[in-house]
């Protein structure tokens, strides 16, 4: 008798199927299906977010302790910061230049509807820097302030590193919580195709065909830019600096990228990104535990592309010229605003509302249009941001190993 072949659950393939079905179902589904699918999508997102903060905190503490050297910890953080800021600057520049080359927005005519859209408040980089250290770490966990959680984890990790044996009980506790978090995330990942299907279906239903076609040209150009940026910049980084095949890289990070596309949240994708980094890309946890949460917080390459892209488009549509000086100002402000943009769905809206007046654009006229297409743009942007986090992590695996000679 022939042995029965065991069924192999390919999560990446099923996520792709979930995405495709979600798009189709979202466009044709009746009204009564929206509520149950929305409930399932919410449950899935909650299940992912449930483990984000214990996983990030404990894995970062364990990563720092595992490094065993305070100087090396600072080196990893500095290298990651330089990578992220550098790529964000280039992305912002690309987003300003491409729409001008393609003459996007010149045929559009956007007029004010008279309706006032309340812009979300955004404190900018200064508020971000001054609020890095949490005055109450428990509140930081409750409110989900990722930057403060990262800062607190670094402080605790460095303290454990200094105290050594005296801090072993805390290290053991963090290790146990980290293992539990990874196990829970592994189980949640089994449900990712269903969660992504529900997320995409509800997004497509809410926006509809008319909204998709309304700014179809801009979205097409934007997604082509996403693809080229990911392939050329991240693929090039991984190949030339990280010494890894781009094919192996993109295949290894596919589950995280597809989850980010479906959920529009780089923060919620952190657990899956960590799993991809350690298991598929063979990145040491001491690197990924620091670079991935940091990337989800400050690495917003695609957000910079979106904001620059839309600023240029709206300027052309409204007949407002962008001088060289204005473009330089937008470029600088865009990089700073992107660093402070939260890695959650709709996080770029506040940053765009702050950037538009700098470019001399009428916020009350354009913000409503931007919000209408934000989710469509945000899906691809989040996917690219997560790819950037993992590309940086992969590159640092090689560069740090080369420096240490290991």
Image (tube, grey):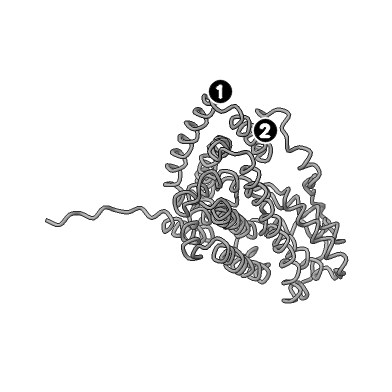
In this rendering, which labeled residue sits more in front, label 2 or label 1?
1
Residue at the spot 73% in from the left edge and 29% down from the top edge:
135
Vertical relation: 275 (above or below) 131: below
Instruction: Answer yes or no: is residue 262 visible.
Output: no
Q: Nearer the viewer, residue 337 or 345?
A: 337
Label 2 packing within 10 angstroms: few (<14), some (14-19), many (20+):
some
Label 1 packing within 10 angstroms: few (<14), some (14-19), many (20+):
few
Left or right of 404 in this view: 183: left
User: For residue 149, what is the image quadrant?
Assistant: top right
Quadrant, the N terminus = bottom left
Residue at the farthest front position: 405
Which percent across, then down, holds residue 59? 54, 38
Which percent across, then down, holds residue 175? 49, 33
Left or right of 7 in this view: 167: right
Residue at the spot 77% in from the left edge and 52% down from the top edge:
336
Residue at the farthest left position: 1
Instruction: Answer yes or no: is residue 406 visible.
Output: yes
**Cβ–Cβ under 8 Å for marks 2 and 1:** no
Label 1 SS: helix
- Disc tally is 2
Residue at the spot 62% in from the left edge and 56% down from the top edge:
385
Q: In this figure, which residue is indicated by the disc labeled 1? A: 166
Q: In this figure, which residue is indicated by the disc labeled 2? A: 140
Left or right of 213 in this view: 336: right
Q: Nearer the viewer, residue 47 or 392?
A: 392
Label 2 SS: helix
Which percent across, then down, holds residue 389? 59, 53
């Amino acid at each position: 008798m022939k042995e029965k072949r065991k069924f192999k659950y390919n999560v990446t393939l099923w996520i792709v199927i979930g995405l495709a079905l979600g798009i189709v179902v979202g466009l044709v589904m009746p009204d009564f299906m929206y509520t149950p699918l929305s409930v399932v999508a919410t449950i899935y997102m909650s299940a992912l977010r449930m483990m984000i903060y214990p996983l990030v905190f404990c894995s970062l503490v364990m990563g720092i302790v595992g490094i065993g050297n305070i100087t090396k910890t600072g080196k990893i953080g500095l290298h990651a910061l330089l990578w992220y800021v550098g790529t964000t600057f280039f992305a912002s520049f690309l987003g300003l230049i491409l729409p001008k080359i393609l003459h996007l927005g010149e045929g559009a005519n956007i007029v004010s509807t008279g309706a006032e859209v309340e812009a979300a408040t955004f404190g900018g980089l200064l508020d971000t820097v001054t609020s890095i250290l949490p005055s109450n770490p428990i509140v930081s966990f409750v409110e989900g302030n990722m930057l403060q959680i990262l800062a607190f984890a670094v402080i605790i990790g460095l303290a454990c590193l200094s105290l050594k044996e005296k801090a072993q009980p805390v290290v053991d506790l963090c290790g146990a919580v980290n293992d539990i978090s990874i196990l829970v995330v592994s189980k949640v990942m089994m449900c990712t195709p269903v969660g992504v299907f529900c997320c995409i279906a509800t997004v497509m239903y809410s926006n509809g065909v008319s909204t998709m076609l309304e700014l179809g040209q801009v979205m097409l150009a934007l997604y082509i830019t996403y693809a080229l940026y990911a392939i050329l910049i991240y693929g090039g980084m991984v190949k030339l600096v990280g010494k890894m095949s781009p094919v192996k890289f993109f295949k290894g990070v596919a589950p995280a990228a597809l989850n980010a596309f479906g959920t529009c949240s780089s923060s919620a994708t952190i657990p899956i990104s960590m799993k991809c980094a350690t298991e598929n890309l063979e990145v040491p946890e001491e690197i990924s535990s620091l670079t991935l949460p940091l990337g989800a917080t400050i690495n917003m390459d695609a957000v910079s592309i979106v904001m620059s892209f839309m600023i240029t488009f709206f300027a052309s549509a409204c007949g407002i010229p962008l001088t060289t000086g204005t473009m330089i100002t937008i470029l600088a402000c865009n990089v700073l605003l992107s660093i402070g943009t939260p890695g959650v769905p709709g996080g770029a809206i506040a940053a765009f509302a702050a950037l538009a007046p700098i470019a001399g654009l009428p916020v009350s006229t354009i913000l409503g249009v931007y919000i209408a297409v934000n989710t469509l743009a945000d899906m691809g942007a989040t996917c690219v941001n997560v790819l950037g986090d993992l590309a940086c992590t992969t590159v640092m695996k090689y560069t740090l190993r080369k420096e240490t000679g290991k």
